[in-house]
Amino acid sequence: MTHYLHYLAAIVLLAMAGYALARHLAHDKNGINFTLSGIVRFGLLGILAVNGLVLVWCNLAGVILPPGFIIFLDISPIVLVMLLLGVTGFCWVTKRSWIVVRTVGAEER
């Protein structure tokens, strides 16, 4: 049951990240750029998603990996989430945003 909840949460996370990335890349920026804190947080989420995909692949029948790598794969999501919580807490305290919105003046259009 827990695996299914994790898989469902991963599907939702990947869908939201894919939608945001596709929308950002599809020229819908309108003066919106990622800040350094946004890049760091987005990068941590990306690494966490890739780690989750590798864990799903690792759980398939017939996949044999070294025990040390499996332990690394089991521990790394916890470390990544703790890093993400730390960065997010730091950005919350210092009031740093994911994005910065730059307004385009009439003379630049």
Image (cartoon, grey):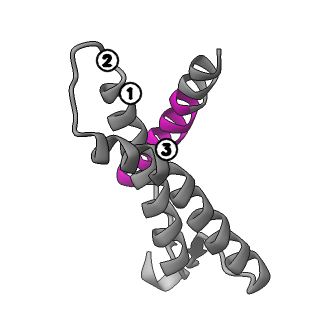
Identify residue for label 1. Answer: 56
Percent of width and height locating residue 105 = 54, 82
Percent of width and height locating residue 28 = 45, 53
The answer to which of 64 and 89 lies nearer the viewer is: 64
Q: Earlier in the sequence, mark 1 or mark 3?
A: 3
Q: Dot 2: within a 10 Å radius of its alpha carbon, few (fewer than 14), some, or many (20 or more) residues?
A: few
- Give the vertical position of 103 relative to 8 (above or below): below
Q: Which mark is residue 100?
A: none
Quadrant housing residue 59: top left
Q: Residue at horizontal 54%, vertical 76%?
A: 37
Q: Which mark is residue 17?
A: 3
The answer to which of 99 and 30 lies nearer the viewer is: 99
Q: Secondary structure at mark 3?
A: helix
- Give the vertical position of 56 relative to 41 (above or below): above
Question: Do tag 1 and tag 2 residues touch (Cβ < 8 Å)?
Answer: yes
Q: Secondary structure at mark 1?
A: helix
Q: Which mark is residue 60?
A: 2
Residue 19 belongs to the span the image colors magenta = yes
Residue farthest along the front direction in this orientation: 67
Q: Is residue 31 visible?
A: no
